[in-house]
Amino acid sequence: MNRKQFILSKVATCANWTWSWSFIDHNDMNVIFGAWDTEAGEEREVILRTSWEFVSRDGKQRRQPGYVQALEHLEYVKQGYELYTFVMGHSLSEYSEDISRIKKFSHHLQQRYLVQEEGVWYACREAQYLPEELSASALYNEGAKTQILVNAYERDPAARKACLQHHGYRCQGCGFSFEEFYGEAGRNFIHVHHRIPLHTVGENYRPDPVNDMVPLCPNCRAMVHRSTPPMETDALKEIIACAGLKRKAGQ
């Protein structure tokens, strides 16, 4: 299976199969990036640098069309699309040291969180922090030069799709529906929560989309992750129900 066949098997596409290293699936709201093995660390891997915008060839600076497309795809991640990566083996082009070639690639998608720092976009293996938990000094340190973006994601797009086909797009915690509130803009939007934290299971773990995964709105998902291990959905419902009774009682 070549790279194009692999990406198409994930129902994603791109503008050009020759120069693209980012791909998108609008139906399931997924973005996939190829990440160079030379840019990968233990905790995160680089998927885009501002320095990649231009390459030298034949003594001229040329803009990489893949760079523009990558920026566009990252905007979708910021808007709620799920982020995945696969590893690409790096080799240099015979024409230029600025041009990279793929010598091999992994046929396995990895779940990732998106973080941007000083003109570099990282795909992180673990969620190190949530935006609402950052202090003001962390957010605005050094003239607000560091921008932090977090995206929730699932290990397997097919599992996420199966979960939503069964449970629907209504939050299983508070009952909120994005489509009912926002109309067309909110159609088919919801986060999916794993009842078993992904960082505690092995690479071969395959969740049960009906019993192991549940749709939650961002607020409810943030609440269940405030405890370790994450709060059970039934416990969250009890908290919401008690809050509702207190409001009715005027407390």
Image (cartoon, grey):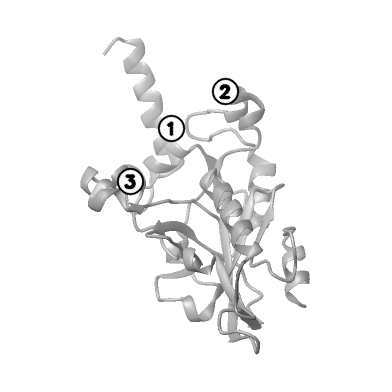
The furthest residue to the left? 137
Residue 193 in the image, given as x and y percentages of width and height: 50, 48
Residue 74 in the image, given as x and y percentages of width and height: 55, 53
Q: Is residue 126 left or right of residue 73?
A: left
User: Is 126 situated above or below 79?
Assistant: below
Front label number (3 vs 1): 3
Mark 3: which secondary structure? loop
Residue 126 in the image, given as x and y percentages of width and height: 41, 62
Mark 2: which secondary structure? helix
What crowding class fits label 2: few (fewer than 14 Cα within 10 Å), some (14-19), or many (20 or more)?
Answer: few
What crowding class fits label 3: few (fewer than 14 Cα within 10 Å), some (14-19), or many (20 or more)?
Answer: few
Quadrant for the N terminus, please.
bottom right
Query: Mark 1–mark 2 contact, CB under 8 Å?
Result: no
Residue 123 in the image, given as x and y percentages of width and height: 48, 63
CA separation in Å, label 1 and label 2 = 20 Å
Three-letter residue code for mark 1: Lys
CA separation in Å, label 3 and label 1 = 15 Å
Please indicate, yes or no, whether residue 204 appears anywhere in the rendered image: no
What numbered label is drawn on residue 181?
A: 2
Please indicate, yes or no, whether residue 234 appears anywhere in the rendered image: yes
Q: Is residue 86 left or right of residue 162?
A: left
Quadrant for the C terminus, please.
top left
Quarter of the image holding residue 167?
A: top right
Three-letter residue code for mark 2: Phe
Residue behind mark 1? 237
Front label number (1 vs 2): 2
The furthest residue to the front? 59
Residue behind mark 3? 226
Q: Earlier in the sequence, mark 3 or mark 1?
A: 3
